[in-house]
Amino acid sequence: MRPWLAAIALVASLRAEAQQQEYAVGAGTHPHDVAPAADGGVWFTAQATGELGWLDPATGAVLRIPLGAGSAPHGVIVGPDGAAWITDGGLNAIVRYDPLARRLTEFPVPRRNANLNTAVFDPDGVLWFTGQAGIYGRLDPAEGVVRTWEAPRGAGPYGITITPAGEVYYASLAGNHIARIDRRSGEATPIDPPTPRQGARRVWSDSRGRIFVSEWNSGQLSRFDPASGEWRAWRCPGARPQAYAVYVDERDDVWVSEWGQNALLRFSQVTETFESFPHPAPGADLRQILGRPGEVWGALSGQDKLVVVRRTR
């Protein structure tokens, strides 16, 4: 079979093995980030209403937990302790929610108006996070102390990721670069993509430690290989693509939330082709994406919904 026919056949096979479903999570919630929970549910941040949400995919039931006056949560991840950890820009704090005790714990960030964004846990159980005002920081839950550093190029730190080897990288949207954090010293070293003013928004590592970057301004998905220093880039399909977030699944397929097409994209590293999962209604505003084996979840902030793409085989 000719290579291009093989690629078409593979894309058709991938589409046949995936199903898409959406869930309403409450009018006016404007969900921003999602995190599959250990109990089979899905956490989400209701940024507009200052709440942490939990969806039961089996029934569609939604639980909403108020985070406090002034809350405007951005990111949520599940920690090694099974709790939901939230970066809350309104409270200017890292917030932990224990689903068993149903208890909230706040860890104030010492830098005022940090515009907190995204967090990740390293192999030692330390939480690293970003703030678009120009900071990044860490919280060791065992100590309960938050420490921050000024970003080397000022405003912009946004998405953050951890590699299988335990290296931490963040993306700077306003700064148009990614950076590697030395976990011992806390020092961040900027790394410039070859495309100028590309708007590196979020980052994710694949199983080989290569860093994928969603470029908001250029509409590209790019990849940085720390081992070789090589960059590669692929323009997302469509006339005016805007790549918002990126996530690499357990098969090393790369997922991108793309605003120009109002779609979730899957990029195959094997064929170097994109497959699109469009949303039926306009203005979905698909933001962060995250998954677990067999599922990729996203937050449709423009439609007050969560979306999932499930593999059927």
Image (cartoon, rainbow, N blue to C red):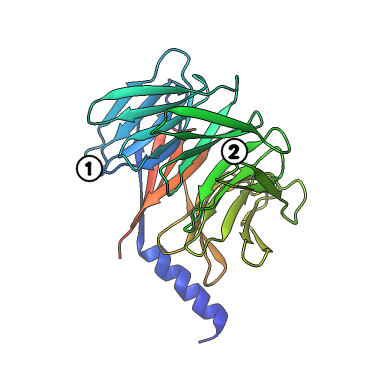
* Residue 121 picture quarter: top left
Q: Please give the name of the residue rendered at 55% of the width and 85% of the height, measured from the top-left corner.
A: 2
Q: Amino acid at mark 1?
A: Ala
Q: Amino acid at mark 2?
A: Tyr
The residue beneath circle 1 is: 58
Q: Please give the name of the residue rendered at 22% of the width and 38% of the height, measured from the top-left corner.
A: 59
Q: Please give the name of the residue rendered at 75% of the width and 57% of the height, measured from the top-left corner.
A: 194
Q: Please give the name of the residue rendered at 50% of the width and 79% of the height, measured from the top-left corner.
A: 6
Earlier residue among tags 1 and 2: 1
> Where, quadrant-wise, is the C terminus in this rendering?
bottom left
| Viewer-side residue, 278 vs 191 | 191
Task: Specify whether residue 296 is in view.
Answer: no
Give x and y (percent) for residue 11: 47, 68
The residue beneath circle 2 is: 158
Give x and y (percent) for residue 68: 40, 15
- SS type, badge 2: strand
> Quick one: label 2, few (<14), some, or many (20+) residues within 10 Å?
many
| Viewer-side residue, 138 vs 303 | 138
Give x and y (percent) for residue 249: 43, 57
Query: Horizontal placement of 173 versus 20: left or right?
Result: right
Give x and y (percent) for residue 280: 45, 44
Q: CA distance from mark 1 to mark 2?
A: 32 Å
